[in-house]
Image (cartoon, rainbow, N blue to C red):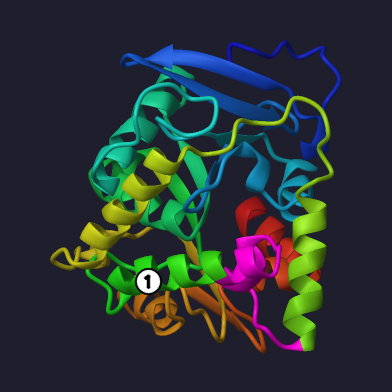
Amino acid sequence: MSPTHSSNEPVVTSYAVAPSHTITAGGTTFAYRELGPVGGIPVLFFVHLAATLDNWDPRIIDAIAQNRHVIAFDQRGVGASSGAFPDTLEESAGDAYTFITALGYEKIDIFSFSMGGMIAQDLILEHPELVRKLVLTGTGPRGGKDIDKVVGVTYRDILRATLTRSDPKEFLFFNRNETGKRAGKAFVERLKERTADRDKPISVKAFRTQLAAIQKYGRSAPADLSVITQPTLIANGDNDRMVPTPLSEDLHRRIKDSKLIIYPDSGHGGIFQYHEEFAPVAVEFLGR
């Protein structure tokens, strides 16, 4: 059980009002939020490039928190967590392990998106006994084809967003057709539902370090994912420009008995565009 809860406190199931906490371990003070009923195996949320605690879609995290204890956290050097983001994603996985064990958990489920899914894979390979179930969305394997191109795509879309006074996620996560534009704007609005106690935005230095770490991950020797035996759900849009969709298919081939969902007419943020369809699938998978 988390040290921050007592069982007679009211259960918070809305991420917009989930309390923020900190815990210090291994020289880092980690910022995190938790919601949902305490007890059993918690679901740890591993967030994407440039993201802080304020970047989880409430339609997905709230759905899972209806009957599961959910914990979202800032990696070292991101948002309200102290220190500097490490040079490699393996080190980030080590930080995640430090955080999880400091909270006192020996078994977790993982929900991950994009860079968070890369860190989650490194964590499960290093500590297979820690993870019971794995959700990998909008992500790819170590050494995956064209992952290293994420840097160019990201900077181009940040520029496009700046020129149109938009949120870069509208370009990076969604197609630029009418459906994608509508979904992107709706997603960005949902991220504003939390109005009090918002997280610090990521620093430019941490953002650049993350991009370089993703590039190294993409250029590394492939990891042996055949050793992942945990039930795994993989999801993406059919036109992911950041972490190309074929990499989700590659993960599916390499992780035995994994389940793959590819949503049509959607990009990197396919699970957010299709949150009404995806959230119940994720709830059912994690609740099994």
Q: Is residue 240 above or below residue 276?
A: below
Specify whether residue 121 is in view: yes
Instruction: Say what secondary structure mark 1 lies in.
Output: helix
Residue under the point 47% across and 34% down: 78
- Is 21 on the left or on the right of 210, as rendered? right
- Residue 22: x percent and y percent? 55, 16
Residue under the point 75% across and 58% down: 188
Front residue of 148/36: it is 148
Q: Which region is colored magenta? A: 160-177
Q: Is residue 88 above or below residue 266?
A: above
Give the quadrant of the C terminus: bottom right
Q: Amino acid at mark 1?
A: Gly
- Residue 210: x percent and y percent? 36, 49
Q: Is residue 98 above or below residue 185?
A: above
Quadrant in which residue 218 is drawn: bottom left
- Is 280 on the left or on the right of 95, as rendered? right
Front residue of 210/158: it is 158
Q: Is residue 175 magenta?
A: yes
Disc 1 designates what residue?
A: 152
- Residue 287: x percent and y percent? 66, 52
Residue under the point 58% across and 27% down: 32
- Is 268 on the left or on the right of 96, as rendered? right
- Count the labels in the image: 1
Q: Residues within 10 Å of mark 1 (few under 14, many from 20)?
A: few
Q: Is residue 125 magenta?
A: no
Specify whether residue 1 is in view: no
Quadrant in which residue 19 is drawn: top right
- Residue 228: x percent and y percent? 31, 59
